[in-house]
Amino acid sequence: MTKLSVNINKFATLRNARGGNLPDILKVAQDCERFGADGITVHPRPDERHIRYQDVRDLKPLVTTEFNIEGYPSKEFMDLVLAVKPDQCTLVPDPPNAITSNTGWDTVAHQSQLKEVISTLKQAGIRVSIFLNPDITKVEGAKTAGADRIELYTGPYAEEYTKARTQPQNLQLFNDYKNTAKEATAIGLGLNAGHDLNLDNLRFFKLHIPQLAEVSIGHALVADALYFGLENTIQLYKRQLAD
């Protein structure tokens, strides 16, 4: 069964909007695990507008499932990850002012940088995943750089899936995802996915890309929890991922 890692950034956004400690991010993470999440994901950014660096440090001894830290490998980020030693580090090519992740790595142009960063992380015993567009030509570069997995950037898929419901077109872009996934599996890379996955589009993705090891979902899951409750929502998402 594909694992569900809950990205808790949006809970931190809510906390930071008012100040104080409501909701309590540490309790949120523990509750997500108690309600069935297979992992906890955080994406600290330089301005700490949601998850703060101290949150990441405080979460480490509490997370009992898989702890995944996402981010751009700046010196500050790398220092944090190497100190915390999560189960997995997902490298994303976000500029400092990005609202959210919106593209994957060019593993050819950034091969030297990625090799150096990944080597450092793996020496610390941390599994490494690279955020990647559905582009088969970039998969080999991820392997050469030393990554253990790729995380498919599913924003374009989510957008096309919505259009396909109302327009006379098929999901042509989805072939790129399937081909990228097949290539990754063929050369020994694990497969994750994330961004804009929700209760409407997740099942289709899972059924057609059965190699999927893990998805990271935050924004949509938190929005759904406003209506369905957090425990019920996590179970609804896990149901979409069932084999």
Image: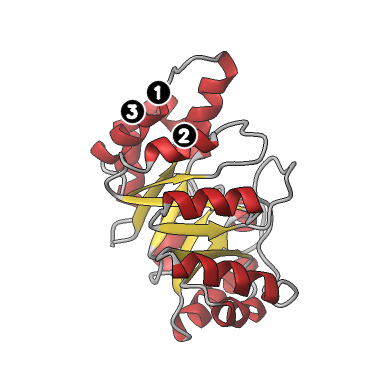
Q: Which residue is mark 3?
A: 27
Question: What residue lies at 33% left-to-right and 40% top-to-bottom?
Answer: 234
Which label sits in the foreground, 2 or 1? 2
Judging depth in this view, the residue of 170 and 92 nearest the camera is 92
Q: Amino acid at mark 1?
A: Asp
Q: Amino acid at mark 3?
A: Lys
Quadrant including the C terminus: bottom left
Question: Label 1: how many residues lie within 10 Å, few (<14), some (14-19) or many (20+)?
Answer: few
Judging depth in this view, the residue of 186 and 54 nearest the camera is 54
Q: Amino acid at mark 2?
A: Asp
Q: Which residue is mark 2?
A: 55
Residue 227 lies, with reference to residue 126, above or below; the image says: above
Q: Which residue is mark 1?
A: 24
Q: Identify the element where label 2 is drawn.
A: helix
Question: What residue lies at 49% left-to-right and 14% top-to-bottom?
Answer: 20
**Image spot of residue 185 (x, y percent):** 45, 80
Which label sits in the foreground, 3 or 2? 2
| Extreme residue in the bottom direction | 187
Instruction: Assess whether mark 2 and mark 3 are in contact (beta carbons under 8 angstroms).
Output: no
Residue 236 lies, with reference to residue 10, above or below; the image says: below
Dot 3 or dot 2, earlier in sequence: 3
Judging depth in this view, the residue of 225 and 110 nearest the camera is 110
Residue 174 lies, with reference to residue 95, above or below; the image says: below
